[in-house]
Amino acid sequence: MTSPDVEPRLDSADPAEQFAAYLDHYRAVVVHKLDGLTEAQLRESRLPSGWTPLELLTHLVHMERRWFVWGFLGEQVAHPWGDNVDDAPESPWHVPDDVSRDELVAALHAGGAQTSDVLESHDLAERAAVGGRFTVDDEVPTLLWICFHVLQEYARHAGHLDVVRELADGSTGE
C-alpha cells in the first residue's frame, strides 16, 4: 500500500503500472481521510447534499467494481448499484446500519487488488466486454478510458473528503 502523503513516483514508462500506483495512492488517501473520525462523524452529513463519509466510501467501492468487473470484464455482479438506496444509479448513496467502516475499507482494498490484476493482464487499448455493464448497442470504452474515469472519480472524491474532514474536526491537508 502506498503512503497517503506521497504522490507515487515510479521509474516506469508503463501506463498500466502508473494507473495501478495512482489508484492505490488515492485509495490510501481516502482511507487516511476517514481515520480518526468517530462512528457518528462517519455516519453524519455536514453538507447540504446530505451524503456521509461512509456513503462516499461505499460509492467508491461500488464505482470501481462497476467499471472494472461489471464494465470491463463483463462479469455479472450482484447489485452493481449497491451503493444507491434503490440499487439504481439515480438514487442517493446509502450504507446499511450493519455495514462498518472496516468492512468497507476491506472491500475497497479487495477491489483494488482485482483492479491491479486486470491492469496486469490486459492491454489498455482493449475494449470492455459486452454482456455486463455494456450491450452491443453501447459505445464500449477502452480499458485506458476506464482507468482515467476511475482515477478522476477517486481524485474528485478525495477532495470532497478534504472539505468534510475540515468541517468535522478542523483537519486539513493530506
Image (cartoon, grey):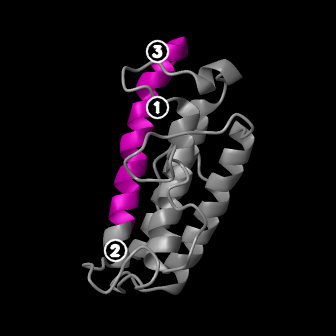
When the figure is inspected, residue 139 is found, relative to residue 45, above or below; the finding is below
Q: Residue at x 54, y 80 (%)?
A: 120
Q: Residue 91, how many percent across, how many down?
A: 42, 44
- Residue receiving disc 3: 167
Closer to the chain start, of discs 1 and 2, is: 2
Residues at circles 1 and 3 in contact by the CB criterion of under 8 Å: no
Report, in whole angstroms, how far the alpha carbon at label 1 lies from the one at label 3: 10 Å
Residues in magenta, as a range: 147-174
Crowding near the residue tagged with mark 2, few <14, some 14–19, many ≥20 C-alpha atoms within 10 Å: some
Frontmost residue, 121 versus 39: 39
Q: Quadrant of residue 76?
A: bottom right
Crowding near the residue tagged with mark 3, few <14, some 14–19, many ≥20 C-alpha atoms within 10 Å: some
Report, in whole angstroms, how far the alpha carbon at label 1 lies from the one at label 2: 26 Å
Frontmost residue, 68 versus 99: 99
Give, as a three-letter code, the residue at label 2. Leu
When the figure is inspected, residue 70 is found, relative to residue 151, above or below; the finding is below
Query: Total label count?
Result: 3
When the figure is inspected, residue 29 is found, relative to residue 129, above or below; the finding is above
- Does dot 3 land on a helix, a strand or a loop? helix
- Residue receiving disc 2: 144
| Residue 171 is a magenta residue | yes
Q: Residue 44, how many percent across, how many down?
A: 56, 21
- Does dot 2 land on a helix, a strand or a loop? helix
| Residue 53 is a magenta residue | no
- Residue receiving disc 1: 161
Q: Is residue 11 in view from this perspective? A: no
Closer to the chain start, of discs 1 and 3, is: 1
Q: Which residue ends up furthest to the front in the rendered image?
A: 86
Q: Residue at x 55, y 79 (%)?
A: 75
Report, in whole angstroms, how far the alpha carbon at label 2 lies from the one at label 3: 35 Å
When the figure is inspected, residue 104 is found, relative to residue 170, above or below; the finding is below
Give, as a three-letter code, the residue at label 1. Leu
